[in-house]
Image: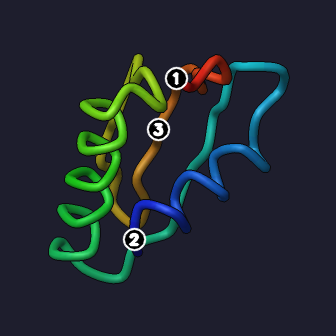
Amino acid sequence: MNKNTLLKTLSQASRGNFFTIELPVQSGEEAETIEHVAAELEREGKIKIRECTLKETSIYIQGIIKYALT
């Protein structure tokens, strides 16, 4: 999963600026990749992560999408 795909998925799962999503993962590597991409989006200032939790078969992400991008 790349940054654009994750950002698009998060924006589709959002209510206003807030999003909550649970993404299914097949392996630990895939979960690590999603966490890394989400952290990268946060560093770029596109999202703010409140919670990122790895569960058995999915990864749960909750946060805010920042729409006022320049």
Q: Extreme front residue here?
A: 70
Picture quadrant where residue 21 is located: top right
Where is residue 43? Give x, y as percent.
Answer: 24, 31
Q: Residues within 10 Å of mark 1 (few under 14, many from 20)?
A: some
- Kindly indicate whether the residue at mark 3 contacts the one at mark 1 (C-beta within 8 angstroms): yes
Check disc 2 and report the residue beneath it: 2
Where is residue 44? Give x, y as percent.
Answer: 32, 34
| Amino acid at dot 3 | Ile
| Amino acid at dot 1 | Gly
Check disc 1 and report the residue beneath it: 63
Residue at 51% across, 63% down: 4
In the displayed structure, 53 sits above or below 49; it is below
Query: Disc number at residue 61?
Result: 3
Disc 1 and disc 3: Cα gap in Å?
7 Å
Label 3 secondary element: strand
| Amino acid at dot 2 | Asn
Disc 1 and disc 2: Cα gap in Å?
18 Å
Image label count: 3
Label 1 secondary element: strand
